Image (spheres, rainbow, N blue to C red):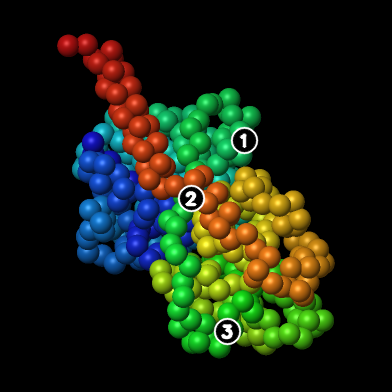
Amino acid sequence: MKVVVLGTRGFPNIQGGVETHCAELYPRLVAAGCDVTVIGRAPYTGKAPYEYEGVKIIPLACPKNKFLEAVWHTFCGVLKARQIGCDVLHIHAIGPALFVPLARLLGMNVVMTHHGPDYDRKKWNAVAKGVLKLGERLGVKFANHVITVSKAIAAMVYQKYGREVTAIPNGVVIFPRAVGRHVLSRYNVEQSKYILAVGRFVPEKGFDELLQSFQQFSAKNQDGWKLVIAGDADHDDDFSRKFKQDCRNTSDVVLTGFIKGRELRELYSHAALFVLPSYHEGLPIVLLEALSYGASCLVSDIPANREVCLEKDRYFKPGDIPTMTRKLHQYLDNFSEDSMDRQGMINYIRETYNWDHIAEQTLGLYQQSASFSRAEKAETYPV
């Protein structure tokens, strides 16, 4: 089966939830016998085509601009996919889904994955939010099949559009807890003496409010805790520049930049507390990653985070800095690793968010979609 993929910047080692999703999913589909071509974005992948674990990545030029990038790239990408030819065109996210009708007009069989209502993100202005809502509506209406990365998104799509979809979650790879402390030494951070946050520097992640909460926490707790934030901005803007400057002006805050692999695994393994204060998520891979190491977690009370079944007291209202600060004290003032049921959480994540199972479900949907498409064409064009 020949599959072409749009809606991701590319991979590996490119920041973003969709990028992580695709980097795990498509090599598994190649191993299952699929011929997969990802149409990437040249500003992130470089201009030369390459392969990653059997997946072919073909970069296309596009402006590195948060308002134009996805729209321009997906339009050109649909035309490129038609030129390549495929059994399934898989489009990720509701922005790129704006061009699902074009792909259908060109005769392609389209699967769309809804990674979350991106129009809820703080970074978008009214026009961009309108375009994203239109992309969601067109994608859901015209795609042959729709996947959502969470049950909450599936319920939302059904409520808004009356369409049944297939919920296939994000996943996580289970690694042993890291023993080494090379990254900790580099940043002068002690094991189990830091709070960890991971993600892009955009307003909806709530990192600016986490910083304020940490400042209030540190004013009362003098035990040498640090806040480590792993990530960066895709597109530097006034928000990200101010946030990074505020971090540099705050003692005991460490910015690592975007990191992956062994370095990130080490930070997950030795964190006393992982905090995800987002206003918006699809199904946060960084939370699944943190839990896969048995990390103690504190997260915002939004549908995507509630889908990962944590104890009730692990949630706080997005933007509620006093409650976040109180919970930092609650979990860190008398912190003890011995009180954490790491293995129980790891087992839960392994069973529930397994990439091998996710790939099997996705392949099954591809086969169903391709078979339906062939039957539809046979009825439309009788021999």
Residue where numbered disc 1 is placed:
156
For mark 3, does the 10 Å Cα neighbourhood hold few (<14), some (14 to 19), or many (20 or more) residues? many
Q: Nearer the viewer, residue 14 or 365?
A: 365
Is 308 situated above or below 273?
above
What residue is at 77 percent from the left and 75 percent from the top? 333
Report the quarter where the N terminus lies: top left
Residue 189 tag number: 3
Q: Nearer the viewer, mark 3 or mark 2?
A: 2
**Taking 341 as reference, is 254 above or below it?**
below
The quarter holding residue 261 reads bottom left
Tell which circle, 3 or 2, labels the residue nearer the N-terminal end: 3
Q: What kind of element bears circle 1?
A: helix
Mark 3 belongs to which amino acid? Answer: Val
Secondary element under disc 2, as helix, strand or loop, is helix
Q: Is residue 6 visible?
A: no
Give the spatial CA distance, label 1 vs label 3: 42 Å
> In the shown orientation, is residue 40 left or right of residue 332?
left
Question: Which residue occupies the foreground of this view, 179 or 305?
Answer: 179
User: Where is residue 365 shown, x and y percent of the image?
Assistant: 37, 32
Residue at the extreme left: 383
Mark 2, mark 1: which one is toward the viewer? 2
**x, y percentage for residue 210?**
69, 70
What amino acid is at disc 1?
A: Met
Residue in the picture at 31% in, 30% down: 367
Task: Looking at this view, name the residue that lies furthest to the front.
Answer: 338
Residue that numbered label 2 is attached to: 350
User: Amino acid under label 2?
Assistant: Arg
Q: Of the residues under marks 2 and 1, which one precedes in the sequence?
A: 1
Q: CA distance from mark 3 to mark 2?
A: 29 Å
**CB atoms at circles 3 and 2 under 8 Å apart?**
no
Residue 374, percent across and down? 27, 22
Please tell me which residue is depicted at 63% across the width and 29% down the height of the picture: 159
